Image (cartoon, grey):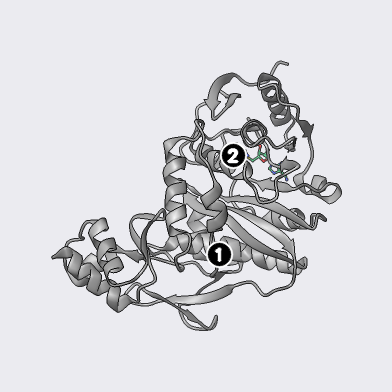
Amino acid sequence: MTLPFPTVEVVEGRARLLVPDVPRRKGPLPRGDVPFYNPTNAVNRDVSAVLLARWPGGLRDAFDGLAATGAWGIRIALEASVPRVVFNDRSRDACDLVRANLDRNHVDGEVRTADMQDVLRSESFDFVDIDPFGPPTPFLRAAIAGDRPEFGLGVTATDTAPLSGTYPEACVRRYGARPLRCPQGHEIGLRILIGHIARRAAEAGRVIEPVLSFSAEHFLRTHLRVLRGRDPAPIATFTRDPDGGFHPCEPSERGSIGPLWSGPLSDREVLSRLRTTEWSRSQAVRLLDALRSEADLPPFFASTDDLARRLRVSPPRLDRFLDALRAMGYRAARTHFDPRGVKTDAPMGDIERAFSEATN
Ligand SMILES: C[S@@+](CC[C@H](N)C(=O)[O-])C[C@H]1O[C@@H](n2cnc3c(N)ncnc32)[C@H](O)[C@@H]1O
């Protein structure tokens, strides 16, 4: 098969992939019309492969709905051993490239050239992956409409600037929620994304359970279980206090953030069963370790930069700060959201006390 653009082979996980050999602009946007391959998203695919290999209840099939090169679905077939993977992209060139990559990796996959939403109107899957350019919002309704009693959903959002508060109006328009530019902006963005999915799910008589969610590079990513049900979702609005703490508030309160998902971002039980493989790069291994240790802690985190500025001290070593919080009887862990952040169940007064003790 001759492709109308030059290609180069890359190795990612267990897959050998032909990808377009074109200069890339900085950032996540595609160049021209050639199928898109972004090596910095490999951590996303590393984590999906490890997770889908141990997905609760197992998976009979998965749908790579916006496949581009087929990188995600091919890795899921090879590394997570999902028996049937269906690939789709509305671009013919992308579908040709997916076929070439399936042959190259000896994977049997079905390839559709259609609008993702049309495929989802006639077919259902145990896992649906949505990895678009920018916001995933246009695809959510169709993805959630699947008629299986329970299925998995993987959602990537690359519009982190709106979600984390750089362009708040765009976030309100797309997600119906107010973000905040602050050290916790990416966690707020991830919670706004999940809260939005929960509200779309509720419209379809569904509830969601986040299984594994994180922020990395230039994107936010969540993997969820979608189940039948009408229980109210843990959705709330918060304000950020001048001391950097958060408290729930009425949506009408001035400066309120959200509505956003206030429940767990990941399922600690599932996380504890995951096993990284020889194909997981170190960034994914570190990320999974961090997600495991912070999984049970409440929303948001203390920024040591904020604390140091406010208390006019230089930040202590993070492990000393964590030890001081634990010595006071609180739970505390580093957070993947910020290398200088600490998640804890301590109230702000004790966070400040532990911080001051750790600086001495
Ligand atoms: C960001 S790329 C996907 C990257 C890929 N998942 C990966 O892991 O490398 C998005 C792809 O979605 C395709 N696309 C955009 N809108 C679509 C739609 N409505 N239906 C089907 N494909 C679509 C584009 O042609 C593009 O190839």
Q: Earlier in the sequence, mark 2 or mark 1?
A: 2
Q: Are marks 2 and 1 in contact (CB under 8 Å)?
A: no
Q: Nearer the viewer, residue 16 or 84?
A: 84
In the image, residue 136 above or below residue 167: above
Instruction: Assess disc 1: are there few (<14), some (14-19) or many (≥20) residues with their C-alpha within 10 Å of its C-alpha.
Output: many
| Residue 78 in picture, x, y percent from top left | 64, 30
Q: Nearer the viewer, residue 310 or 280?
A: 280
- In the rendered image, the residue lying farthest to the right is 122
- The residue nearer to you, when weighing 27 against 337, is 337
What residue sits 56% from the left and 19% below the top?
A: 8
Is residue 212 at all visible to an observer of this figure? Answer: yes
Amino acid bearing label 2: Ala
User: With respect to residue 306, does 37 lie above or below?
Assistant: above
Tell me which corner region of the image, top left, top right, bottom left or bottom right, holds residue 34.
Answer: top right
Image spot of residue 359 (x, y percent)? 16, 64
* Element carrying mark 1: helix
Residue 166 visible in the snapshot: no
- The reply, left or right, for residue 133 in relation to residue 310 is right
Q: Which residue bears the numbered disc 1?
A: 192
> Residue 344: where, in percent of width, then height?
37, 67
In the rendered image, the residue lying farthest to the top is 2
Where residue 213 sits, quadrant-wise, is bottom right
Task: Quarter of the image for the N terminus: give it.
Answer: top right
Q: Which residue is mark 2?
A: 49
Element class at badge 2: helix
Q: Quadrant of ligand 1?
A: top right
Is 308 on the left or on the right of 261, as rendered?
left
Left or right: 248 as drawn, with respect to 4: left
